[in-house]
Image: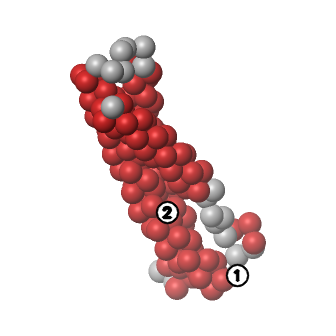
Amino acid sequence: MRTTDTQLAAWQDARAEIRHQARLATTFSSACLLGAVVVCGVLIGLGGADVSDGQAASAVLSGAVLMLVLAATGLAVVVGCDRRINRQLTRASALAEQLDLPVTGAPAQPGITMTLWIIHIIIGLLSLLILCGAAASLIR
């Protein structure tokens, strides 16, 4: 195989890896967010319960901790995938320059990871607010 064919295959491999990592981040993030939505729904259902009851407050507290764990896990996966995407983008860009590919041949940064970062941070902040409210009701 010629050097150009090898470089083109490596460039295509880097693009495929970028797409794979973006799909992995999206899929895992969706699963974590779905779990957080289910927990949030349960917490809303518990919202009608007597908050002064210690059992309801501890259930809300544990639900908030579970939501926080789900948000942090999803964020960790998104950060890891984003690092691998950036590494492959650098590799693909270097190969595209060597191959003199047109501008449209260079893969663009997938904006999905930034969106997922923001969503997981919002879920984490919501979890912290719920956690603080549940802790305050237990202290009273």
Tag 1: residue type? Asp
Residue in front for this viewpoint, 113 or 121:
121
Specify few, some or many for label 1: CA neighbours under 10 Å numbering under 14, 14-19, or 20 or more.
few
Disc 1, SS: loop
Looking at this view, name the residue that lies furthest to the front: 140
Looking at this view, name the residue that lies furthest to the left: 55
Q: Are marks 2 and 1 in contact (CB under 8 Å)?
A: no
Tell me the residue that label 1 is attached to.
Answer: 100
Q: Position of residue 73 (x, y in %)?
A: 36, 50
User: Which of the 4 quarters of the picture holds residue 94?
Assistant: bottom right
Q: Position of residue 96 (x, y in %)?
A: 64, 78
| Residue 33 visible, this angle | yes
Q: Tag on residue 8?
A: none
Tag 2: residue type? Asp
Q: Position of residue 64 (x, y in %)?
A: 36, 36
Looking at this view, name the residue that lies furthest to the right: 103
**16 lies above or below 129:** below
**62 lies above or below 24:** above
What is the C-alpha distance between the residues marked 2 and 1?
Answer: 26 Å
Residue lying at 56% horizontally and 71% vertically, measured from the top left:
89
Specify few, some or many for label 2: CA neighbours under 10 Å numbering under 14, 14-19, or 20 or more.
many
Q: Is residue 104 left or right of residue 77?
A: right
Disc 2, SS: helix
Residue lying at 34% horizontally and 37% vertically, measured from the top left:
135
| Residue 31 visible, this angle | no
Q: Tag on residue 82?
A: 2
Circle nearer the N terminus (2, 1) = 2
Residue in front for this viewpoint, 26 or 124:
124
**99 lies above or below 22:** below
Residue lying at 37% horizontally and 44% vertically, measured from the top left:
68
